[in-house]
Amino acid sequence: MIRTMFSVMLGMLVAMMVMLGLEFVGTWMFPMPAGQLAEDADLATIVANAPTGKLVWVLLGWLIAAVCGGWVAARFARARRMAAAIAVGLLLVLGVLLNAWMLPHPLWMTLPGLIGPVPLAWCGGRLALGRTHLAN
């Protein structure tokens, strides 16, 4: 049980590292506008005016993080491996929900961000189990 919880935490750590890494690359590809952010409203304006490519890049970061985090959680858990992977997906959905609540995102970006992480974390978990567990 404890190892499964640690595997979920490790999966979330990897998922966050993947998301942050991809967002770092995204800021290199799509630089932020010049100036400092004085208020949260400034950040909301930047998100509202962000190019579509930047928003797609962030969405891909969420979805790729779900696969990677689900894989890690299932790989390191001893019992309930798929439950660990799905838990990572659910935690990512919670993160996307909080992110969309604090910073309004377009609906076309929010919906896949809410729907995609759980099935993709499940796919990552299946990849971690290998061929011997596919019949189960």
Image (cartoon, helix red, strand yellow):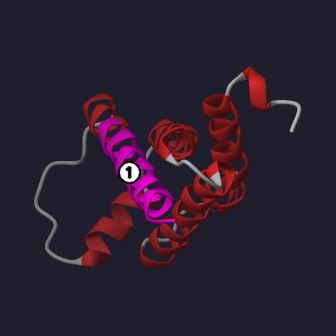
Q: Is residue 65 magenta?
A: no
Q: Of the residues shown, which amino acid type is indicated by label 1?
A: Leu
Q: Residue furthest right?
A: 135
Residue that appears at 88% across and 31% down: 135
Q: Which residues are magenta?
A: 1-21
Rendered view: 106 above or below 10: below
Residue 63 or 58: which is nearer the viewer?
A: 63
Q: Nearer the viewer, residue 39 or 110?
A: 110
* Percent position of residue 93, x then y: 59, 64
- Location of residue 84 (image quadrant): bottom right
Instruction: Give coordinates of residue 111: x percent, y percent.
Output: 70, 60
Residue 14 locus on image (x, y percent): 38, 44
Image x and y of residue 49, in percent = 43, 55
Q: Left or right: where does residue 104 sit relative to residue 33?
A: right
Q: Looking at the image, which is closer to me, 58 or 92?
A: 92
Q: Looking at the magenta stretch, what is its main secondary structure?
A: helix
Callout 1 secondary element = helix
Q: Is residue 126 above or below residue 38?
A: above
Mark 1 nearby-residue class (10 Å; few <14, some 14–19, many ≥20) = some
Q: Nearer the viewer, residue 59 or 38?
A: 59
